[in-house]
Amino acid sequence: MSSASAVKVGLLFGSFNPLHTGHLILAHFMATHTDLDAVWLVVSPQSPFKMEQQELLPGEQRLELVNLAIRHNDRLRALDVEFSMPKPSYTIDTLDELRQQYPDHRFVLLMGEDNLPGLPRWKQADRILAEHEVYVYPRPGVDATAVNAHPGVRVVDAPLLDISATFIRDCVRTGKSIRYLVPEAVEEQIIRQGYWK
C-alpha cells in the first residue's frame, strides 16, 4: 500500500447507460463525506456479467454523457481506461493498469452492497481484497454477508437511491419525462441525439 500522503481515489465502475442522478449523488457523497480525495467514474465498455448489449450506447457516447454531467465538479472525473483494454474488462486488470499509470495514487473500489456477495467469484478477488480497500454503499433490500466482515471492506452510510438506467431508457422510449432523473445537460443530449428511441 502507498504512503498516507498518496492521493486516495474511489473508483465507481459502471456502464452508465445513461449516467443518472443516483450515480452522481453517490459519487459526490463518497468524494466529500469519506476520506477520498476524488471519485473517478470508470465507464465500462462491456461487463463480463451483463452480456446483453443490445441497448448499450457506444462507449464514447456514454463517456460524453458522464463528462457533460460532471463538468462543473472538480472532485469527479470520467475515465475511459477500459476502452483500450481487452474485452470483457475485469476489475483487477483495470486496477493494475491504473496503478501503473498513477503510482502515487491509492485506489479504492466503490461497490453496491448487492454486488458484494458476488465479489469472491471475481477474477483474482483475493488480490482485490488484499491490495485495495472496498467501500460499500447500501442497496434496497440487501442483507449483510460474510464479505462485509472482511477487514478491507468498509460499509458507508450513503443515501439509498433506487434509480435504474433501465427505467430511464424505458421512459425515453415511451416519451415520458426524465427530468431530475438525469442532469439537465444529459437529458438535453439524449433528446438531441435521439438515444433509445
Image (cartoon, grey):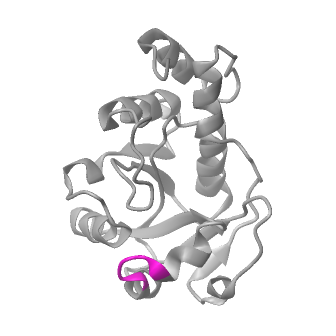
Res. 104 image quadrant: bottom left
Q: Is residue 184 visible?
A: no
Res. 25 image quadrant: top right
Q: Is residue 32 visible?
A: yes
Q: Read off the magenta span.
A: 121-125
Q: Is residue 123 left or right of residue 156?
A: left
Residue 132, given in percent of the width and then of the height, sits at: 45, 78
Q: Residue at x 35, y 51 (%)?
A: 46
Residue 9, given in percent of the width and then of the height, sits at: 46, 61
Q: Nearer the viewer, residue 7 or 45?
A: 45
- Which residue appears farthest toward the top when viewing the image? 192
Q: Residue at x 45, y 29 (%)?
A: 65
Is 131 inside the magenta-drawn segment?
no
Q: Residue at x 61, y 47 (%)?
A: 28
Q: Main secondary structure of the magenta part?
A: loop
Q: Give the total number of marks visible in the rendering.
A: 0
Depicted 122 relative to depicted 182: above or below: below
Q: Nearer the viewer, residue 92 or 31?
A: 92
Is 123 inside the magenta-drawn segment?
yes
- Which residue appears farthest toward the right when viewing the image? 141
Q: Is residue 6 left or right of residue 85?
A: right
Residue 192, given in percent of the width and then of the height, sits at: 46, 10
